[in-house]
Amino acid sequence: MARAVKFDRYGGVEELKVVEVPTPKAGPGRVVVEVVAAGINPGEGYIRSGALHERWPATFPSGEGTDFAGRVVEIGSGVGGIEIGAEVLGFTDERASHATHVVVPAEQVTLKPSKLDWDVAGSLYVAGTTAFATVRAVDSQVGDTVAVSGAAGGVGSIAVQLLRARGATVLGIASEVNHDWLRKAGVIPVAYGAGLIDRIRAAAPDGVDAFIDTFGAEYVDIAIELGIAVERIDTIINWEAAERYGVKTDGNAAAGTIDVLAELADLAAAGTVEVPIAAVYPLDKVQEAYRELEQRHTRGKIVLHP
Ligand SMILES: NC(=O)c1ccc[n+]([C@@H]2O[C@H](COP(=O)([O-])OP(=O)(O)OC[C@H]3O[C@@H](n4cnc5c(N)ncnc54)[C@H](OP(=O)(O)O)[C@@H]3O)[C@@H](O)[C@H]2O)c1
């Protein structure tokens, strides 16, 4: 038997439980991975709460989880180029990675670079490919000044480093507790709260060229007020503001491919991108993991160990 996180109805973290399930079988074109580490993402909490029922309904009992890293333990017919025991990272589209075992199409895994930490590998897909999409969406160029809200979160912490790698000056909007981490990443920290626009203008006297919003709230309004062109503003959460102003909404769906994941894995293994691991929880503590995530003050990623 395998073990997997499930919930039987919409609700709070208390709906999450770990249950025994049959160990998945590979089937044609698929591989079974024994999961070593699996990241958690805010969207999973929104789905579990029912808030996204219109957009992405759940069917019950529902599993959860997209990101994972682990070892291949079974290979289905027709799959080539991968061996039992291979260390891989990847993603599932079936809300199923928060489990001891996950079965996915073979093209949804890529070999884990040996230097890549398991926890980083297991939490790279959603946040990393989303960050990649946001940076591409705002077309960041050498010499640009780009502001990022939620700059130390799962998506933001990766986005700011990708922007630096592309030669941008980066303003990272975050609370004081994250300012040292941002400075070390070459980012100019800016505290959020009253007076934010003035602090952004003071930090970027020649203006801000692009804005990536990974937090929501009033950040798209602020980007508009700063005079940034709508095609250089990307929000991954505020659909209402995006519709109102016509700004971009590129996120995971725009860059969530195995090729982008492999590129990010190489960048993380090389140390070009650091993914801070805020906390690691055993699978049985999944409720606590989401309680921490739902405080919305995570630096980097929270990871489950099945
Ligand atoms: N559209 C997509 O494809 C897509 C993909 C992934 C995620 N998302 C969404 O994007 C959002 C971010 O995801 P994530 O994984 O990065 O979340 P996360 O890791 O939970 O982000 C937490 C960050 O938010 C910051 N924060 C809290 N209050 C803030 C405020 N008032 N202003 C600015 N920053 C604030 C925190 O910084 P401090 O500790 O400094 O306060 C923390 O670093 C979520 O809503 C998620 O659902 C969308």
Image (spheres, rainbow, N blue to C red):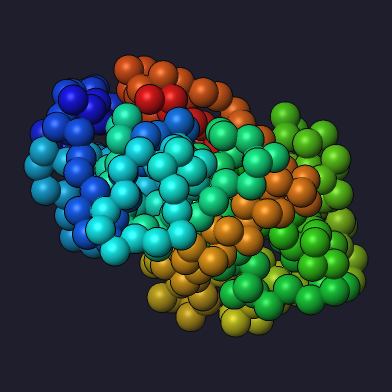
Q: Is residue 177 left or right of residue 101?
A: right
Quarter of the picture holding the N terminus: top left
* Nearer to me, 169 or 265: 265
- Relative height, residue 224 to residue 266 (above, below): below
Residue 71: image quadrant is top left
Q: Is residue 298 visible?
A: no
Residue 136, x across and y down, in percent: 63, 73
- Relative height, residue 48 to residue 75 (above, below): above
* Nearer to me, 198 or 148: 148
For the point 64% across and 47% down, which residue is it?
Answer: 113
- Relative height, residue 261 to residue 44 (above, below): below
* Nearer to me, 73 or 209: 73
For the point 59% across and 80% down, which residue is it?
Answer: 230
Q: Is residue 203 visible?
A: yes
For the point 11% across and 38% down, which residue is it?
Answer: 61
Residue 295, x across and y down, in percent: 47, 30
Residue 218, x across and y down, in percent: 54, 57
The total number of labels drawn is 0
Residue 57, x across and y down, in percent: 17, 54
For the point 85% across and 67% down, which residue is it?
Answer: 167
Quarter of the picture holding the C terminus: top left
Residue 35: image quadrant is top left
Q: Is residue 182 left or right of residue 118?
A: right
